Image (cartoon, rainbow, N blue to C red):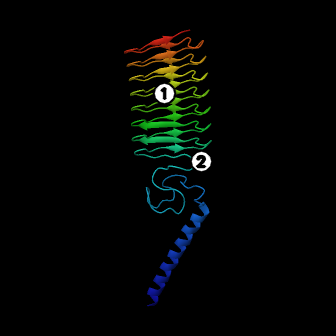
Amino acid sequence: MGVTRRVVSSALLLLLGATVCFASRALLVAPQELPYGVGHGIGDVIPGGGWHFFPGYGAGGEFGGIGEYGGGYGGGSGSGVGYGAGGDHGGGYGTGAGTGSGGGYGAGGEHGGGYGGGGGSGTGVGYGAGGENGGGYGIGSGKGGGAGYGAGGEHGGGYGGGGGSGAGVGSGAGGEHGGGYGTGSGAGAGGGYGAGGDHGGGYGGGGGSGGGVGYGAGGDHGAGYGTGSGAGGGVGYGA
């Protein structure tokens, strides 16, 4: 009888201690300030679900960090979306596979300094580091993959590489659409926009319909080079 009582008492004490520990941890983290946690799996008993005694749920991190939505990683459909560390949506990195995966949003301005990589439809979109949509790099494959947006002006200094329809579009570094380089293959691939004036100093290379369009470097549409193959390929504008 005495042994049974000791065992029951010990079990109750252990249960009480664990309850106090988890409750204290939940209060210290203040989940109302970080409603989506520092990342999936942090504090979870089972990755991908389970108890949430402090912010964090699932496997692979989704929200949290320094800015409003900071720094997530993951895999699967719509996976790997990273939100912010600097401005409103800064310093995020997204990697993964599946539909819409690999979207990275910003570090510098409103949507700055993001990198996106992955595979599937619409993957690999990178948004900016300098101005409003500056200094972004996009890599990937699939429809609309590899779109890069800007570093200098409003849409400056972007590089885009990839394969598929509309891949490899590079927009600007100097003026409004300056100093961009576009390479790739497929319909409309390899469009490069400017470095000097409004649409200056661009180089475009690639293959397919409408590939290799280059726009200017000197005046409004000056000093452009166009190379490529297919219908409408290799169009060069001015000097």
Are discs 1 and 2 less than 8 Å apart at CB? no
Identify which amino acid the numbered label 1 is placed on: Gly
Q: Is residue 153 above or below residue 52?
A: above
Q: Position of residue 147 (x, y in %)?
A: 48, 30
Q: Identify the image quadrant of the C terminus.
A: top right
Quadrant location of residue 90?
A: top right
Specify few, some or many for label 2: CA neighbours under 10 Å numbering under 14, 14-19, or 20 or more. Answer: some
Q: Which mark is residue 68?
A: 2
Q: Residue at 52% across / 36% down in the picture?
A: 115
State the SS at label 2: loop
Q: Which mark is residue 19?
A: none
Q: Residue at 48% across / 18% down in the picture?
A: 204
Q: Nearer the viewer, residue 72 or 154?
A: 154
Identify which amino acid the numbered label 2 is placed on: Glu
Q: Identify the image quadrant of the N terminus.
A: bottom left
- Is residue 123 toward the left or the right of residue 155 in the image? left
Q: Nearer the viewer, mark 1 or mark 2?
A: 2
Q: Position of residue 86 (x, y in %)?
A: 62, 42
Q: Residue at 60% across / 43% down in the picture?
A: 88
State the SS at label 1: strand
Q: Which residue is mark 1?
A: 160
Q: Position of residue 192 (x, y in %)?
A: 50, 20
Q: Tell me how far mark 1 sits from mark 2, CA to CA.
A: 28 Å
Q: Is residue 100 above or below residue 221?
A: below
Quadrant location of residue 119?
A: top left
Q: Is residue 128 above or below residue 32?
A: above
Name, please, the residue furthest toward the bottom: 1
Quadrant location of residue 223?
A: top right
Q: Nearer the viewer, residue 5 or 234?
A: 234
